[in-house]
């Protein structure tokens, strides 16, 4: 699949805030390269309707595990307590297993460090998509290296998604250059070498793709966790993922021999991202069996999610971050859930 032209994707609101802060004078705009397609003609594989949610209801998807990490099914509403900013909340609805459609983003690292593991990721990732996707589910595929490329937009077609995964190629394309900005003109370049735009890709997947959807949403990132040259920071990526209400899983895939004795150090930032969003980091290395096991674990967790909804006692939609706690009556159980949400009105 050929790379398409780069399009500016930042919202006007965000762009204005960046201009005010002087960000554009030192940074490139993070952009998402999209496949060539007439945007006025919806693909038969793309959703043609939009869904709306009640802005007064907070919806949570979470897993419950025992001390050994095993999933605990069949618990009841009365087995849990939900708190927002330390205050108990009345649960309006509860489901022990979520059958809601899943919207899934697959992000695959195509930077130079992935040379020896990329083909493994494509093969096992494709098998996972065949296993997890159901009739009403949607998924998209992004690759990231010196660019961030949308290889396949939302579709239910496993064949199209696999084709997109297989089109990912290692790209070490040189140092920083200009990216088209306002009106197609260049903006000043960052002096940081661009090699692995990991944080930018997470932000764009969350802000430009998942934030536009509703319901169950998850992002799976195949990477060694190392970022080089992103315009945005890890906290920007975390915040975007939180605002999109997406669970993030990171599969740490790397050939340690590539790094020599120093090893790689991206795990800490990836743990921050996954813990804040209700996912987790799974160490894979360059072992195909470990990657298969990791995808199997994710599939089981996504199919075993509890779903609760509540109307917060604090009804103000003031954009602040609200911290959520879910407690099980059995203290030996561990809850795997996002840490909170941003109280903003959703766009229709």
Image (tube, rainbow, N blue to C red):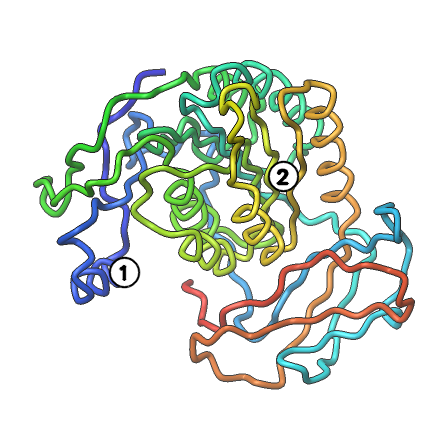
Residue at 65% in and 71% down:
324
Observer-nearest of 91 and 42: 91
Image quadrant occupied by the C terminus: bottom left
Residue bearing mark 2:
136
Vertical comparison of 92 with 192: above or below: below
Residue at 33% in and 27% down:
35
Residue bearing mark 1:
14
Residue at 48% in and 48% down:
210
Percent of width and height locating residue 289? 74, 20
Vertical comparison of 294 with 324: above or below: above
Spatial separation of the CA atoms under disc 1 and disc 2 = 32 Å
Is 137 placed left or right of 295 in the picture? left
Vertical comparison of 342 with 96: above or below: below
Is 288 placed left or right of 190 in the picture? right
Residue at 61% in and 21% down:
126
The picture quadrant where one finds residue 291 is top right
Q: Residues within 10 Å of mark 1 (few under 14, many from 20)?
A: few
Q: Residue furthest front?
A: 261
Image quadrant occupied by the N terminus: top left
Closer to us: mark 1 or mark 2? 1
Percent of width and height locating residue 192? 25, 40
Observer-nearest of 258 and 197: 258
Is 7 placed left or right of 326 in the picture? left
Percent of width and height locating residue 346? 45, 66
Vertical comparison of 113 with 339: above or below: above
Is 23 placed left or right of 212 in the picture? left
Percent of width and height locating residue 109? 46, 28
Q: Residues within 10 Å of mark 2 (few under 14, many from 20)?
A: few
Q: Which tag, 1 or 2, sits closer to the chain's start?
A: 1
């Amino acid at each position: 699949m050929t790379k398409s032209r780069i399009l500016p994707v930042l919202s006007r609101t965000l762009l204005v805030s960046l201009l005010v802060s002087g960000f554009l004078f030192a940074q490139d705009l993070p952009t998402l390269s999209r496949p060539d397609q007439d945007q006025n003609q919806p693909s038969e594989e793309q959703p043609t309707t939009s869904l709306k949610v009640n802005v007064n209801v907070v919806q949570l998807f979470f897993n419950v595990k025992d001390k050994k990490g095993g999933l605990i099914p069949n618990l009841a509403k009365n087995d849990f307590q939900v708190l927002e900013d330390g205050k108990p909340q009345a649960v309006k609805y509860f489901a022990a297993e979520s059958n809601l459609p899943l919207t899934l983003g697959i992000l695959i690292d195509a930077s130079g460090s992935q040379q020896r593991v990329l083909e493994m990721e494509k093969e096992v990732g494709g098998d996972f998509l065949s296993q997890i996707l159901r009739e009403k589910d949607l998924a998209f595929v992004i690759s990231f290296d010196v660019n961030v490329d949308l290889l396949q937009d939302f579709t239910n077609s496993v064949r199209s998604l696999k084709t997109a995964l297989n089109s990912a190629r290692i790209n070490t394309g040189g140092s920083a250059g200009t990216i088209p900005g306002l009106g197609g003109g260049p903006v000043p370049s960052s002096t940081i070498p661009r090699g692995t735009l990991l944080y930018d890709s997470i932000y764009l997947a969350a802000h430009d793709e998942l934030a536009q959807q509703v319901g169950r949403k998850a992002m799976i990132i195949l990477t060694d966790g190392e970022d080089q040259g992103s315009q945005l920071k890890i906290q920007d990526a975390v915040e975007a993922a939180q605002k999109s209400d997406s669970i993030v899983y990171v599969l740490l895939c790397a050939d340690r021999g590539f790094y020599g004795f120093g090893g790689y150090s991206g795990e800490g930032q990836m743990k921050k991202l996954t813990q804040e969003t209700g996912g987790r980091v799974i160490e894979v290395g360059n072992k195909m069996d470990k990657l298969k096991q990791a995808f199997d674990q994710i599939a089981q967790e996504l199919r075993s999610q509890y779903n609760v909804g509540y109307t917060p006692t604090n009804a103000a939609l003031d954009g602040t971050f609200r911290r959520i706690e879910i407690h099980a009556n059995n203290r030996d159980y561990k809850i795997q859930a996002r840490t909170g949400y941003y109280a903003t009105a959703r766009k229709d």
